[in-house]
Image (cartoon, helix red, strand yellow):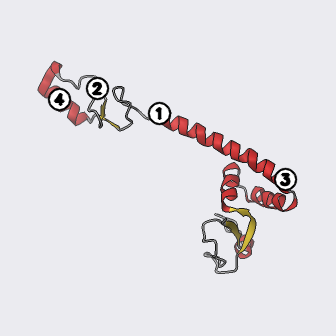
Amino acid sequence: MDMLKFCSTCRRVNQENFHGYIAWVEEDCYECPICGDKMIDTSISVDEYYIIDKISDEVNFLEAMIKLKEDDIIEYQLRMSQFRTQVQQQDDIKQLVEEKYIPRCPNCNSPNVQPISSVKSFFSIALGGIFSNMINKTYECNDCGYTW
């Protein structure tokens, strides 16, 4: 399991982006890619870190969670369970919102649709006049060819 790494030198100089905590290095890497100083493993895994970071990006919150895991593992696990549920609900809502606003073909339900270009619409109406199949149509399905 990859553990969140900590560089005390970067923490001391208060690196703004990560405050000395590094999640994106290999598990066996113990040399800070920023300053070259020694890094140590924290008690928090990288997976746990990403959940905590979605709840709050405050470094003090992260440090409190590290301390909580070291001092009271049961309380830590309860909190992490709540955080996982909260993050999952946020992700589910985000996915629903994204899916809801993706236009779908009313004929075949494919999301592989595109707006009909104004040039294509113009030429269709110019050539076909009132008999054009592009009048009042804004989307075209790339799978079945249906326009609406």
Q: CA distance from mark 2 to mark 1?
A: 18 Å
Inspect the image, locate mark 4, and give the three-letter code of the amino acid beneath it. Answer: Ser
Labelled disc at residue 101: 1
Q: Earlier in the sequence, mark 2 or mark 1?
A: 1
Inspect the image, locate mark 3, and give the three-letter code of the amino acid beneath it. Answer: Ile
Inspect the image, locate mark 1, and give the three-letter code of the amino acid beneath it. Answer: Tyr
Q: Earlier in the sequence, mark 4 or mark 3?
A: 3
Q: CA distance from mark 4 to mark 3?
A: 68 Å
| Residue 108 against residue 9 in the figure, above or below | above
Viewer-side label of 2, 3: 3
Mark 4 surroundings: few (<14), some (14-19) or many (≥20) residues within 10 A: some
Viewer-side label of 3, 1: 3
Mark 3 surroundings: few (<14), some (14-19) or many (≥20) residues within 10 A: few
Q: Earlier in the sequence, mark 1 or mark 4?
A: 1
Tag 3 secondary structure: helix
Q: Residue at x 68, y 52 (%)?
A: 51
Q: On the picture, is 37 further left or further right than 135?
A: right
Residue 145 placed where, x, y %? Answer: 26, 32
Q: List the single residue furthest toward the right.
A: 71
- Residue under circle 3? 74
Mark 2 surroundings: few (<14), some (14-19) or many (≥20) residues within 10 A: few
